[in-house]
Image: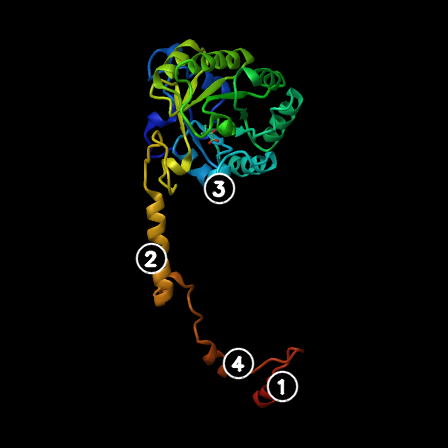
Amino acid sequence: MDPTQGRDPKLMYGSQSATKKVTVPELRARKSTLLGSPELAPKIAMVTAYDYTMARLADEAGMDMVLVGDSLAMVVQGLNTTIPVTLDEMAYHCRVVARGLTRAHLVGDLSFMSYQVSSAQAVESAGKLMKDGAESIKLEGGQEIAEHAYRIVRVGIPVVGHIGLTPQSVHAFGGFKVQGRGEGADKIMADAIALEQAGAFAIVLEAIPPDLAADITSMLTVPTIGIGAGAHCDGQVLVCSDLLGLSRGHQPKFAKRFANLGDAAVNAFSAYVQEVRAGTFPAAAHAYKANAQSAAAQSERRPPISASGDELDAPLALDRWH
Ligand code: KIV
């Protein structure tokens, strides 16, 4: 079945079919200032996914990029920060998400301390995620990791940068706080330049003032992808559970809910609980077709069978079974 049937053709970007993979050169060419108009270069839509089911749904919706983000530490594993998640865990989630994507480009996130130690470590970690289905990797940081990014690009692995509020540095920042105010803006600008020079094909800008994001976007020749960075980036990324309204508790200001699936799920679970307790589920519609005769009627009609397959007299059989 053609998954594009009945869908808005604008979702499909140009004339690409739903099952042709979005490539790195295509994403790079989505730099809006290069092509000048939203029709020629629609903004890049990116979302996180951590499992096969979510990946399939995002892919079917026409998503351009799917990120197996280390935010899975918080969303899937229930941790307070992204710091504890391991590279092996990231690799596992890349593997399962990759199976759900036929069109969207898959970015794998390098976990904390899987790339900061040396360029050799960074290349090895990036290679591991690529072997598990990622088509590019993302790493956090600017000038301080630019050489690692360059080495990864040099071995043929496409790199997405990530600057501004980089959650792996949450303790250095003193919390999940907006970055790039005042003098901090110059550092983030310099970080963006360093990553572009290192060969990153796109750069995520997280939680920075919109005017700074706009300046960086117009300065770079590669697309910027914003999250809490205003409307002037070349694309946007959100965490899937925020977008779908699955998250409970605090929701960041920038995380628009496009649905309220969390409440829908709670309602569905509680309806199920009530029906199971009341015995109204399963109804006949949810049960397989009954045998032609009831089990009692069948055992009356059919003589018991011995281990050797011979028919037994009913009284003897009863003797043996009691
Ligand atoms: O891990 C993640 O989900 C991310 C996005 C917020 C960009 O890095």
The percent coordinates of residue 66 (x first, y second) are 46, 30
Instruction: Nearest to the eye among marks 4 and 1: give it.
Output: 1
Q: Is residue 106 visible?
A: no
The residue depicted at 33 percent of the width and 32 percent of the height is: 256
The residue singled out by tag 3 in the image is 76
Q: Earlier in the sequence, mark 3 or mark 2?
A: 3
Between residue 41 and residue 211, name the one nearer to us: 211
SS at badge 2:
helix
Ligand 1 within 8 Å of the CB at mark 1: no
CA gap, disc 3 to disc 2? 25 Å
SS at badge 1:
helix
Q: Quadrant of the N terminus?
A: top left
Query: Which residue is outermost to the front?
Result: 174
**Residue 271, disc:** 2
Q: Is residue 165 above or below residue 3?
A: above
The residue singled out by tag 1 in the image is 320
Q: Amino acid at mark 2?
A: Ala
The percent coordinates of residue 188 (x first, y second) are 46, 15
Q: Amino acid at mark 3?
A: Val
